[in-house]
């Protein structure tokens, strides 16, 4: 049975490629999404992508994922990582395994970025490996039963 994955990106990730390229690199969100979809397709899986700058829209998309039979979520919650109990509760509530991804190493940045509300309930967290983190997370999700 083919896997059905969901890639979520939170606030400001629509600015990839132009926002602080020294931190986030030159690849755009479209580049990341196209590579992710190609990776999933090569493994016989499907991968839907969604980005929003709005917490509620991300929560609504997570809720919809359960009804869609999503097997795994890869999420880069952006700044909501450090502030959103509601996003954490949505992920816990749908009980879909997820992997948290951060392009930058959040532990090398400002102190307030060192805490994640999601990490404790995530299957795993990848940070500081640039956009390669998405590929690694998808690879893990595809192999996980």
Image: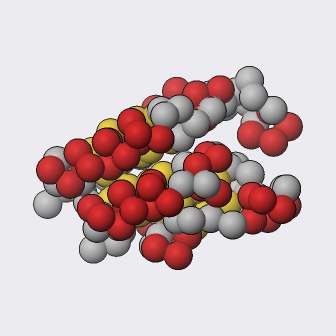
Residue 86 picture quarter:
bottom left
Q: Can residue 63 be seen at all in this image of the molecule? A: yes
- Observer-nearest of 135 and 18: 18
- Observer-nearest of 131 and 111: 111
From the top left corner, tell me how far across and down residue 106 is, in percent.
75, 59
From the top left corner, tell me how far across and down residue 28 is, in percent.
62, 28
Q: How many marks?
A: 0
Q: Is residue 48 above or below residue 31?
A: below
- Observer-nearest of 89 and 72: 89
Q: Is residue 62 left or right of residue 7?
A: left
Q: Is residue 113 above or below residue 21?
A: below
- Residue at image coords 26%, 50%: 63
From the top left corner, tell me how far across and down residue 3 is, in percent.
24, 56
Residue 116 picture quarter:
bottom right
Q: Is residue 104 above or below residue 119?
A: above
- Observer-nearest of 62 and 50: 62
- Residue at image coords 30%, 64%: 93
Q: Quick one: quadrant of the C terminus?
A: bottom left
Q: Quick one: quadrant of the N terminus?
A: bottom left
- Residue at image coords 69%, 66%: 115
From the top left corner, tell me how far across and down residue 130 is, in percent.
70, 49
- Residue at image coords 39%, 36%: 57
Q: Can residue 41 be seen at all in this image of the molecule? A: no
Scheme of image coloration: secondary structure
Q: Is residue 102 left or right of residue 137?
A: right
């Amino acid at each position: 049975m083919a896997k059905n994955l969901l890639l979520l990106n939170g606030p400001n990730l629509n600015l990839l490629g132009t926002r602080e390229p020294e931190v986030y690199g030159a690849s755009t969100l479209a580049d990341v999404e196209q590579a992710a979809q190609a990776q999933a397709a090569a493994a016989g899986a499907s991968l839907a992508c969604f980005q929003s700058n709005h917490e509620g829209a991300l929560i609504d998309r997570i809720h919809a994922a359960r009804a869609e039979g999503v097997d795994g979520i890869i999420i880069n919650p952006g700044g909501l990582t450090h502030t959103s109990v509601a996003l954490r509760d949505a992920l816990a509530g749908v009980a879909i395994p997820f992997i948290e991804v951060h392009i930058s190493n959040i532990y090398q940045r400002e102190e307030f970025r060192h805490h994640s509300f999601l990490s404790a309930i995530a299957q795993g967290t990848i940070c500081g490996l640039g956009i390669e983190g998405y590929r690694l997370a998808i690879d893990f999700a595809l192999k996980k039963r």
